[in-house]
Every structure is written in structure tokens, then in C-alpha cells.
Image (cartoon, grey):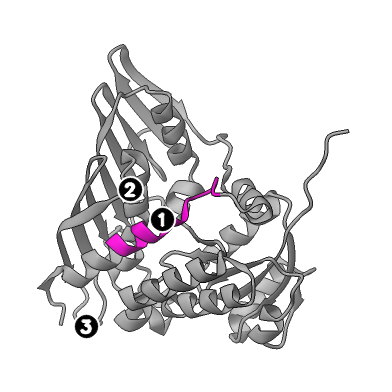
Amino acid sequence: MEKVEPNIRFAVIGINHPHIYGQVNLLLRAGAEFVSFYAPEPDLVAQFAAAYPEVRQTGSAEEILEDETIQLLVTAAIPNERAPLGLAAMRHGKDVMSDKPGFTSLAQLAEVRRVQQETGRIYSICFSERLENPATVKAGELIQAGTIGHVIQSIGLGPHRIRLGTRPDWFFRREQYGGILTDIASHQVDQFLYFTGSTAAEVVAAQVANYKHPHYPELEDFGDMVLRGNGGTGYIRVDWYTPDGLSTWGDGRLTILGTGGYIELRKYCDLAGRPGGNHLFLVDQTGTHYFDCSQVDLPYGRQLVHDILHRTETAMTQPHCFLASELALQAEAQAQRLGYLI
């Protein structure tokens, strides 16, 4: 009989972003056991508890941190609270999976780097636009197979619908959300590093703006950056301008240029084309090829569980996790401020 690896036990502190449902579900798919959660907001708790009725709600975060049977802490707290939670978890002997961004300042990143090295714990950030997107996973498989030659550039576009009436107060406070490049663009930085194979990189140029929402002076609704890595170059643009007429929250795209062809991903919709999302287009020396990626396997959850059990780095290397965050934070810090932004 095939040996089945034991499940890990995980808990959640902080459910302020809906990404927490994806984080929990990817671990459940991997066979992990969801033990307990804590959050102080009654409205968020009611919805979350209804989704996971078998899971125990604790009376405090400390109760979870001090539970030695829990191996992994998962968080989608307010962005500037994620790193402090991660630090506490690592100091209590737990690994961490944070929603993006995992940090809102370079000082937070430096402290987490230090404590991670001291404790040897895993600090993983769930960059869901790569790790939990079937088309992006398929692109990685095709590139590893050499289908477009050597990758030299990525262009990542991350438009979002703002839905102002649904946003909590922290969404509009730069100290709490970190800025648009820190937040949204961390997805595209992660993809740039992954697809170009870059292990070192610099921010060549960056800019942010608030063109449309002067009544929210700390909001940034546009940002872009140019990156140069030791494996290729990248351009990233993110915004909060998705019009209501689009069928989904954003027409996220990724173009990967190689020396033998290119791949374009239409992750969430194919304008005036095929229904649904997870579309991949490959152009090589033989022609144009289309891949429906909706049934592609998503391995991140299983890989992270394996890493927790065996102290490996199959889901994401720690240097990659930290470098993706560092570049987004550096871009935000050095960005030219345009438009109405104060």
C-alpha cells in the first residue's frame, strides 16, 4: 500500500482580504487540516465561519500562536499587519503563508528576513496570480519544456475594478495597504522573476498616480515599473480602472517573450473571443497554438505541505519570495508621483 504523508495542521489569523478563502481552499485540496481561526471583525467572522463551520473560532490570536500542534499560520490580515503576525508565528515555531503583499515597508521585510534566517521557518507569500492561476502554471510548463527558447522579457498587466462602495477604510490608507506597486504589482514582479529566471534584479524606473480619485488622496489608482534582472527584463502596469462593462474584475494579461517564440496569457477573459478565463496563446516557429488551461493542475498547496513536512523549497524558494517583495517595495519607494497624488 502506498504510504500517505501525514496532514499538516494550520490555523488562520486575519481574514480582511477575500483572498483568505483561496488560501484556505488550496491547503484543504492538499489534505491539510484546518484547525482554528481568529479575527476581531464580527461581520467578516460570520461569513468566514459559515464557509468553514467545522473550524473552531478562538478567543485570541495568542491561543493560536501558543498551540504547538499547529504547523502553519495563514493570514490575509490588513496588509501592514501581516509581517508582524508572521514574525510572531515564526518565533512560535510555525511556518507562514501570507496573502500578498507580505510586507508594506522595507523595514518590515528586513525584520522578517532576519527572523526567518534565525528560526529556519518558511515564510511563503501566496502570489495567486501565478500559483493559483491554471494558465500561468501551464506557461511555466511550456517554458521549462523549451517551447519558446530562452525567455528575455515579460510584460505583466494587472488591471482591477475598484468597487469603491465595497472597500474597507484601510484600502484608502497608504500606510496600511502599502501603495499600488507594493500591493498589486507584487504579483507581476513574482511572475517576472519566475519566468525570466532572474535571481537578482533592479528597478530601472517606476511611477504611480491618482488620476481619477482626488477625494481619496492616499489612494494610488495607476502604477508602472521597468525591471532589469540577470535573466531578462520586465515591464509591469497595474491600475484600478476596469470599467463596469467588462465581464470580470480585470483583464489580466501576461506576455512572455522568448528567443524562439512568445506566449500570451488572457487569464480572466478573452475579449470578444472564447468564454471564461485561463486562455493561453503560444506562437512558435510552427504556427499559432491555443491552450484551454481550465483543467490544469495547481501544485502550490501540495508543494507547500511537502516543504513544511520535509523542510524543502519546492513551492517557492525563500530568496525568490523576499526578492519579489523587495523589488515591489523599492519601486513604490522610488516611484515618481504623478496626477493628484499628494
> Where is residue 328 drawn, in percent x and y?
29, 62
Question: Looking at the rendering, in which quadrant would you find the N terminus?
Answer: top right
Specify the principal SS of the magenta part: helix
| 116 to the left or right of 305 | left
Badge 2 is on which residue? 199
> Where is residue 124 drawn, in percent x and y?
51, 60
Q: Residue furthest front?
A: 118
| 242 to the left or right of 96 | left
In depth, the one of 326 and 121 nearer the eye is 121
Question: How much space separates mark 1 and mark 2, taking CA atoms?
Answer: 8 Å
Badge 3 is on which residue? 217
* Mark before the other along the chain sequence, 2 or 3: 2
Residues shaded magenta: 313-327
* Mark before the other along the chain sequence, 1 or 3: 3
The residue sitting at 68% across, 49% down in the picture is 30
Type of amino acid at the residue the image marks with label 3:
Pro
Q: Which mark is residue 278?
A: none
Position of residue 155 relative to residue 215, above or below, is above
Badge 1 is on which residue? 319
Mark 1 in CB contact with mark 2 (< 8 angstroms): yes
